[in-house]
Image (tube, grey):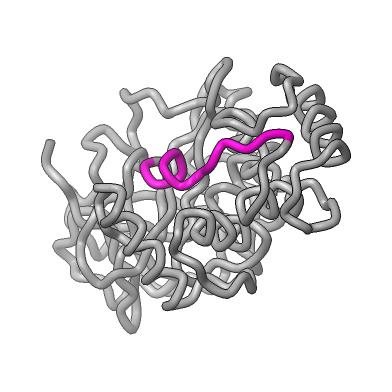
């Protein structure tokens, strides 16, 4: 499969005329320049940034545009599905988990992860890796996208679903969970909900110790190794992470009240209510954030 380079912008005048692919916002009044300046062989990808135009290939989901995902993504995808089409969601890699949690519909996704080096994100059709002065650049790794032919990943019928991709720059309780789990794995950092350089370094140290690819991000490869199975009688940082998600008193003691809350959570998420926080329950807990 041949990787392709895609440029996207509101200002088309700065994009090279011989670009392989160009993403643009046809319905945005701020769009500058005409697509007629590009070669006849240039693949044009249309982007909607408010959720109003199902004729577009991509929905740009981020704060300030099509957000929050729960009120924008699913209706847009539903409208696409009604006419027999599958949409693509563009979002920062740190937000993919929130977008997936907002809908049960299948979609392709295009991830933004700025490293200034061409790279792909597993499972995505494209990865935006660099922002220049007048355009952004992505590496497209799906040869059939956006024209179709491939089947986008959908939510599994049962078992462990998608693990969110959490990287430096992310904030919130899901980062606190990672920080608690790092402590449980012997790589303690301050639990402040800020995925900064120290947390990234701790993730990298854990990945080295676990024989994983060292990229400093917590995704589908790292989560299963980072989680710790806990149950009645367990103590420590992994229990604190469970208590944080369930909004319990955080004391690190897996006692009867924590067990009861875990069982209630499991029942409400279609899981065996055994009170044990193993891979499936951890996955549901993380995806509930």
Residue shown at the point (84%, 29%) measured from the top left: 264
Q: How many marks?
A: 0
The residue drawn where x is 81% and y is 41% is: 255
Which image quarter is the N terminus in?
top left
The residue shown at (26%, 57%) is: 208
Residue 198, visible in the rendered structure: yes
Q: Residue furthest bottom?
A: 133
The answer to whether residue 143 is above or below residue 91 is above
Please state the horizontal and vertical placement of residue 79, each as a whole percent of the image.
Answer: 65, 32
> Which stretch appears magenta?
221-232
Residue extending farthest to the left is: 2
Image quadrant in which you'd find residue 214: bottom left
Kindly identify the residue that appears in the image at 68 percent across and 57 percent down. Answer: 67
Does residue 149 lie above or below 22 as drawn? above
| Residue 136 left/right relative to 252 | left
Q: Is residue 102 visible?
A: no
Q: Is residue 184 left or right of residue 12?
A: right
Question: Which of 168 and 73 lies nearest the eye of the viewer?
Answer: 168
Image spot of residue 44 (x, y percent): 32, 50
Left or right: 194, with 22 as reference point: right
User: Is residue 227 within the magenta segment?
Assistant: yes
Q: Main SS of the magenta segment?
A: loop
Of 63 and 52, nearer the camera is 63
Height in image: 164 above or below 33? above
- Magenta-span inclusion, residue 34: no
Percent x, y of residue 48: 55, 53
The image shows residue 146 at horizontal and vertical percentages of 35, 38
């Amino acid at each position: 499969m041949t990787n392709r380079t895609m440029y996207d912008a509101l200002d088309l005048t700065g994009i090279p005329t011989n670009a392989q692919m160009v993403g643009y916002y046809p319905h945005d009044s701020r769009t500058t320049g005409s697509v007629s300046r590009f070669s006849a062989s240039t693949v044009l990808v249309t982007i909607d940034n408010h959720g109003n135009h199902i004729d577009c290939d991509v929905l740009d989901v981020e704060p300030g545009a099509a957000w929050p995902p729960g009120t924008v993504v699913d209706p847009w995808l539903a409208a696409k599905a009604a006419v027999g089409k599958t949409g693509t969601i563009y979002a920062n890699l740190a937000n993919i988990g929130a977008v997936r949690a907002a809908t049960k519909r299948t979609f392709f996704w295009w991830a933004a992860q700025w490293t200034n080096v061409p790279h792909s994100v597993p499972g995505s059709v494209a990865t935006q890796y660099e922002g220049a002065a007048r355009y952004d650049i992505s590496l497209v790794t799906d040869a059939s996208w956006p024209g179709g032919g491939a089947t986008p990943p959908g939510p599994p019928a049962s078992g462990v679903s998608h693990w969110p991709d959490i990287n430096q720059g992310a904030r919130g309780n899901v980062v606190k969970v990672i920080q608690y789990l790092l402590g449980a794995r012997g790589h303690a950092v301050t639990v402040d909900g800020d995925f900064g350089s120290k947390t990234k370094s701790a993730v990298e140290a854990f990945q080295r110790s676990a024989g994983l690819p060292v990229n400093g991000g917590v995704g589908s490869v790292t989560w299963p190794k980072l989680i710790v199975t806990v149950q009645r009688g367990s103590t420590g940082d992994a229990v604190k992470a469970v208590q944080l998600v369930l909004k319990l008193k955080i004391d690190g003691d897996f006692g009867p009240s924590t067990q009861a809350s875990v069982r209630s959570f499991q029942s409400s998420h279609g899981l065996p209510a055994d009170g044990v926080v193993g891979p499936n329950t951890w996955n549901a807990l993380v995806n509930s954030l």
